Image: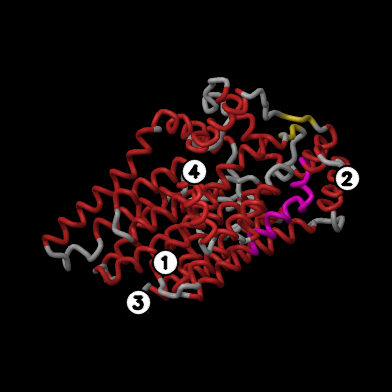
Amino acid sequence: MGKETVLLRKFFSHELAWLIIIGVLLRLAMMPYFSCTYDTNAYCSSLIWILNRYDPYSIHVSIYPPFIYFFDFPLFSLAYQFGLSPGYHYVEEAASIGSVSGLVTPNQVNPLFLVLWKIPLLCFDLLTGLLVYCFAKELTNNPRTPKLFFVIWFFNPFTLVISYFHGAYDVIVAFFVLLGSFFIYSRNYFSAGLSFGLGTLAKVSPIYTALPIAVITLCKGGFRRSSRSDLKANVLDFSKFTTGLLIPLLLFAPLLIEYVRSMLFWVTNEVSIGGGLNQWFFATYPIGWEVVNTNIDIIQKVFYLSPVISLIICFLLCRFLKWNHEWHGNNSLLAITLFTALTYFFASSVVQPQYLLWILPLLVVLSITRRVFIVPLFVLSVAGLVFLLSVQGPHAFLYPLAIYTPLTTPKQIGDTILWYMDLPGKPPYLWQNLCAVFGGIGFVGLLLTIYLIVTSLRHGDRC
């Protein structure tokens, strides 16, 4: 009992204690009654198949990587043991709405499912904030800075809406990318590779950052300028990084192979670009969609050049930057952020708002020593938040609230969505205008991020 009392006293005396308590309570209040019905329906159906010992990939029930189920399976298994079934509630009023927006399903999940699904998101959300706090301790001697940047992450409205309104699990990816960055900064290459490997199991995108970083780890300093001892050290660091990267991928290889096959099935049967927060933001409009998708074959061929472009950037960074002890941390953080930003241009045809969560913690960390990075952090947060709420209108997330509380009704929610989707009556509709405008702002935010990174590298700013 004495140890528990000491631990509680230490916790409540910490400067983050009440911030964590308030943040957790806020998240718990948001968990049960808000969801993106289209995505949560897919999450629930795939988990039901797994709980019944079926492979969700073989019959194309799931399009999500396997690692997410590693966190959720124990929680849902425990719920079933206690007789709690996180299932569906059929809402007839939502069926007709789905034919208009395309993102509403009549099968609505219950609050129990939403709470269980979002508990891991809460854990990784908090861990990401604590990691930002630790990063700030490493990067600055100002005692107020770590707490400030913890708040910037933990109470960012965009991160709250993505994880607890939408229910997207991209915060798990964000944590592992930031954790890998922390280990690269600390020169712990095996743990860095392991972090990027685990992140890849949650979503494929971290591999597009990890592979260029592996090349930089091997070639940093340039072969001509490096001594034999430096080359040996580089090879050793590269071996550690790639070993760590491969271990989780090999451990989950059977499920990962099934997932890749499932993804190929979906990609080959549905290839289109419909807008988003990258260079294709204008495809939200019908004329923009037609222009882009009639040239989809050419665009795909350009996408295939992304590994070559990344490789060229790697060699430029290795050749012209200093990679000694003094500059290693600075260059590594900037390079990781650069390749993460490039992912949005080459690795994903449609950048959904939740994808921006991958880069936000990196921008928070860079802002600790370079306040100028707060600008793209703010731009991307606002653009992603408004874009998400503009697709169907904010009311589309309120179906669980309408079904399980007396505050509103599914019919009222549906009428509001229909009114919003049809406003102002003639194309382009309001939602198309908003998505195009804020998609374009998100695109500008990504360009600004790349520009600031290149400027920092050229001027040799240090952490």
Q: Are marks 1 and 3 in contact (CB under 8 Å)?
A: no
Can you identify the residue that label 3 sits on? 460
* Helix, strand or loop under label 2: helix
**Where residue 73 sits: x, y (%)?**
54, 31
Mark 3 element type: loop
* Mark 2 or 4, nearer chain start: 4
In front: mark 2 or mark 1?
A: 1
Name which quarter of the figure residue 386 lies in: bottom right
* Res. 268 visible in picture: no
Q: Is residue 297 above or below residue 257?
A: below
Whether label 2 touches label 4, CB < 8 Å: no
The residue singled out by tag 2 in the image is 412
Q: Residue at x 55, y 27 (%)?
A: 56
Whole-Å distance between the Cαs marked 2 and 1? 49 Å
Q: CA distance from mark 1 to mark 4?
A: 32 Å
Q: Nearer the viewer, mark 3 or mark 4?
A: 4
Q: CA distance from mark 2 to mark 4?
A: 52 Å
- Please name the amino acid that badge 2 sits on: Gln
Secondary structure of the residue carrying numbered label 1 = helix
Quick one: 121 or 226, which is closer to the camera? 121
